Amino acid sequence: MTTYITRRLATAVPTLILISMVVFGILALAPGDPLGQFAANPDIPPEVRLNILHQLGLDEPIPIRYAKWATSFLQGNWGYSFASHIAASRLILQRLPTDLWVVGSAYLVAVVIAIPIGVISSIKQYSAFDQIATTLAFIGFSLPTFFTGVLLIIIFSVRLRWLPFIYDVQVTDPVGMLRQALMPVAVLALFQAAGLMRFVRSSMLDNVRQDYVRTARAKGLPEAGVVVRHVLRNGLIPVVSLLALGLPAVFTGAVVTEQIFRVPGIGSLLIASIQNSDTPVVMAITFLYAILVVVFNLFADVIYGLLDPRIKYG
């Protein structure tokens, strides 16, 4: 296992380097700069604008800028925001608790709902429960989050006036925090649970008719034991990859949903930074997501070995 993890880490390092080079190059070649809003202002002379660009290092060649960014990143400096002059890491940490609360809760709710429903649907295939669950899953997966978000706002905020439709970080009491998080959590959980439930059901159906399942039943094992100890354990192996790929979004936010409900998370920070051509913040968030994807995929591979003893790591 140690050898395998070491080999995966050795592969992950050049992968992350290549990702950082591609993302940095795209951001550097993208049109616009942080001073673009002043370009048409006659009160700001061109030489002043060029001087500011020089101080920010934006007039240097892209390879030199990338080398400076990579060196600073390895030293723990993720750069400073062009707009607020605050460290990008600090901006991310300021918004991380909100994402962990809203997006993390939605992901946890989705997993808790989707896995049991997917398992029961596969065991009771073509039953009334399976038909209803599959239909609801198709509806939840087909409806985009911006539609369900606006729909919930119209129903529960505009019509019924039960819930606030704008997230307020100044609210500190538990009841108020729960009320304002209900709708964004519901929107994200519905969308994530729908896709996950379909995947769990499909994975379970691939295993429920295998020979080892019939053998377990022939030995007289109770149905619950067959499902939990045999079908579920093997059916969850591909589900682990899906869960691992979804976890980075917990730390980087849900862009669309945060925009709808004005949740001050990392997703909304990313959108604002793109609009302001705030390259250091965009680069920090994007590269953070890449790191999390690599780390959680490695974590998923380790879980594979625990779920399936047939998997051996050399």
Image (tube, rainbow, N blue to C red):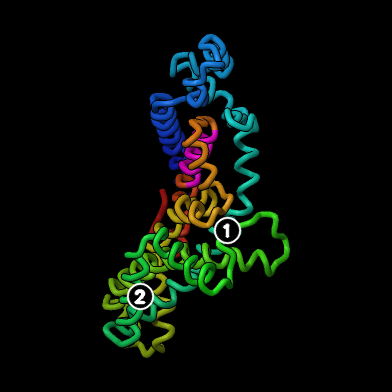
Please tell me how crowded label 1 is: few (under 14), some (14-19), or many (20+) other residues with Cα within 10 Å. Answer: some
Residue 134 in percent (x, y) is at 32, 76
Q: Is residue 146 visible?
A: yes
Residue 124 in percent (x, y) is at 32, 85
Q: What residue sits right under mark 1 in the picture? A: 166
| Residue 291 located within the stretch drawn in magenta | yes
| Residue 218 located within the stretch drawn in magenta | no
Residue farthest to the right, as pictured: 173
The residue range painted magenta reads 281-292
The secondary structure type at the circle numbered 1 is loop
Residue at (35%, 78%) from the top-left corner?
133
Residue at (37%, 60%) from the top-left corner?
144
**Of pointers 2 and 1, the one earlier in the residue sequence:** 2
The secondary structure type at the circle numbered 2 is helix
Dividing the picture into quarters, in which one does residue 136 lie?
A: bottom left
The one of 220 and 62 positioned closer to us in this rendering: 62
Q: What residue sits right under mark 2 in the picture? A: 136
Q: Is residue 314 above or below residue 129?
A: above
Residue at (64%, 56%) from the top-left corner?
168
The one of 63 and 187 positioned closer to us in this rendering: 187
Q: The residue under label 2 is which amino acid type? A: Leu
Please tell me how crowded label 2 is: few (under 14), some (14-19), or many (20+) other residues with Cα within 10 Å. Answer: some
Q: Is residue 31 left or right of residue 159?
A: left
Dividing the picture into quarters, in which one does residue 169 lie?
A: bottom right
